[in-house]
């Protein structure tokens, strides 16, 4: 990525109508004689980080109702989720209950912990690096919780663990914002859509997804700086945290074939495989059953509440597919979508941008996978903003997708507790599918040259995320 000058920045006040009201409130658009890039403190990056911190605080507050505790007669403090508050307040998160539910409060190695569920012995169901991160945060929590016990505050140990985890992931998210600002280049203000996304408010701390996003964005940043080895290491770490970063390699495979320049991709592939294996091998050897729990659970579980398969099940008379059939159909649809994306990327007249391919691959995975935990939508924010920075459509998708969460929680209350019927949830799910499908179609049209590509227009026709062109040797 070449060095950019502040005066080349694209102002959203001039290109994005949805930002007009905010810009006018702040004093109006920048004038032609303004000294752009000479502000000593309030640089775009510091503004973006400030916005990110504000929305992260909203994200913490959205989970705060699930952090309260109560003190028993024995003096012990425990979580208080009475009255189904996790659903009523839509504050449910996996972090708090799994502190004790996965033995993290006991101090042992997480993959050595097991419990019996029916006739089955269960283990921690997260990939290795995610489990090690949870173990690290649990260790810090246990080490520092005695200081909390000295205060008059009623804070359960699980809530303190949540707070430290949220703090660590907030730092990772701020670092991610810093990298996205670089990747956005002359359209640096598009990063506002990442920092101020409604999805951050509802899902930043629902699960442990932020670290995997940081690794993916770090890999894209390394690619833009011509460092395929580092990019591969980060993709390997991301895949050891969550599976989805693996699919990013598909975008670079398409470009490697199209450009007939395989060396950078092969470097990424090799370093990502070695990194993933280095992280996984010790647990794989010492705790094979625990290491396999993630794969076992994903192969044996049915479809999740908000997937297309759940929509079909709830709104048709078709029988539910057996799990093995569902696995085959889900994988087949995703594989077919990836093949179509590859053909499109290879046959498009202009060279596709990295973000466009990554966006389409992640959308295909979310649409056709049998599990779409609502926080998975966080994965799509950065690829969507970098691939298709049309503010109104992106904000519409984010608001609708964020609305899925409280409606899902309300529905999970059950009709006996005044929960909403599935029909209302399904309306929002259909709206999300329609918006994402429309975005995918518009990205495809953009790749085929039938729509304006705002990113290449702002960068002289170049892709800011692509591998730098090799410097020709001197004669």
Image (tube, rainbow, N blue to C red):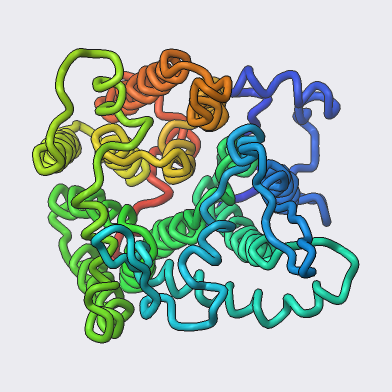
Q: Nearer the viewer, residue 417 or 279?
A: 417
Q: In this image, 212 relative to 362: left or right? A: right
Q: Position of residue 419 (x, y in %)?
A: 54, 22
Q: In the picture shown, does residue 436 fall above or below 42?
A: above
Q: Quadrant of residue 442?
A: top left
Q: Nearer the viewer, residue 152 or 236?
A: 152
Q: In this image, 391 relative to 245: left or right? A: right
Q: Position of residue 246 (x, y in %)?
A: 27, 57
Q: Position of residue 44 (x, y in %)?
A: 71, 47
Q: Residue furthest right?
A: 152
Q: Quadrant of residue 221?
A: bottom left
The residue positioned 67% from the left and 62% from the top of the image is 167
Figure quadrant of the C terminus? bottom left
The residue positioned 15% from the left and 47% from the top of the image is 258
Q: Residue furthest front?
A: 73
Q: Nearer the viewer, residue 205 or 297?
A: 297
The residue positioned 59% from the left and 52% from the top of the image is 177
Q: In the picture shown, does residue 345 fall above or below 290?
A: above
Q: Is residue 473 visible?
A: no
Q: In this image, 306 relative to 68: left or right? A: left
Q: Is residue 155 visible?
A: yes
Q: In the picture shown, does residue 287 fall above or below 459?
A: below
Figure quadrant of the N terminus? bottom left
The residue positioned 86% from the left and 63% from the top of the image is 153
Q: Position of residue 86 (x, y in %)?
A: 61, 41
Q: How many marks?
A: 0
């Amino acid at each position: 990525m070449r060095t950019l000058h502040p005066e080349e920045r694209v102002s959203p006040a001039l290109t994005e109508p949805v930002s007009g009201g905010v810009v006018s409130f702040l004093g109006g658009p920048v004038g032609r004689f303004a000294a752009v890039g000479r502000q000593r403190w309030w640089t775009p990056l510091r503004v973006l980080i400030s916005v990110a911190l504000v929305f992260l605080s909203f994200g913490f507050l959205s989970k705060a109702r699930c952090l309260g505790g109560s003190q028993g007669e024995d003096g012990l403090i425990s979580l208080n989720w009475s009255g189904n508050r996790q659903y009523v307040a839509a504050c449910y998160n996996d972090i708090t209950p799994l502190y004790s539910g996965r033995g993290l409060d006991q101090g042992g190695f997480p993959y050595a912990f097991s419990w019996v569920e029916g006739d089955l012995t269960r283990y921690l169901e997260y990939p290795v690096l995610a489990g090690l991160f949870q173990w690290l945060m649990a260790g810090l929590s246990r080490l520092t919780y005695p200081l909390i016990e000295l205060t008059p505050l009623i804070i359960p140990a699980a809530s303190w663990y949540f707070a430290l985890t949220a703090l660590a992931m907030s730092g990772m998210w701020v670092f991610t914002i810093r990298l996205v600002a670089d990747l956005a280049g002359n359209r640096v203000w598009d990063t506002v859509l990442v920092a101020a996304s409604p999805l951050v408010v509802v899902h930043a701390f629902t699960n442990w997804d932020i670290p995997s996003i940081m690794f993916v964005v770090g890999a894209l940043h390394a690619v833009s700086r011509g460092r395929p080895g580092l990019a591969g290491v980060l993709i390997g770490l991301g895949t050891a945290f969550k599976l989805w970063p693996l699919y990013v390699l598909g975008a670079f495979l398409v470009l490697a074939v199209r450009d007939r320049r395989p060396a950078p991709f092969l470097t990424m592939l090799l370093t990502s495989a070695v990194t993933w294996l280095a992280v996984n091998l010790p647990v794989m050897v010492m705790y094979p059953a625990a290491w396999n729990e993630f794969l076992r659970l994903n192969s044996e579980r049915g479809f999740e509440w908000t997937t297309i398969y759940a929509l079909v099940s709830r709104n048709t008379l078709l029988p539910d597919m057996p799990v093995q059939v569902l696995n085959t159909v889900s994988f087949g649809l995703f594989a077919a979508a990836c093949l179509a994306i590859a053909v499109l990327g290879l046959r498009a007249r202009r060279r596709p941008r990295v973000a466009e391919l990554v966006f389409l691959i992640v959308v295909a995975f979310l649409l056709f996978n049998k599990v779409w935990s609502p926080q998975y939508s966080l994965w799509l924010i950065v690829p969507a903003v970098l691939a298709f920075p049309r503010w109104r459509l992106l904000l519409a998708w984010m608001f609708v997708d964020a609305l899925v969460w409280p409606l899902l929680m309300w529905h999970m209350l059950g009709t006996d507790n005044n929960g909403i019927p599935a029909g209302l949830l399904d309306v929002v799910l259909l709206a999300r599918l329609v918006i994402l499908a429309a975005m995918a179609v518009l990205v495809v049209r953009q790749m085929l040259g039938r729509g304006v590509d705002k990113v290449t227009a702002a960068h002289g026709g170049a892709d800011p995320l692509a591998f730098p062109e090799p410097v020709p040797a001197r004669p």
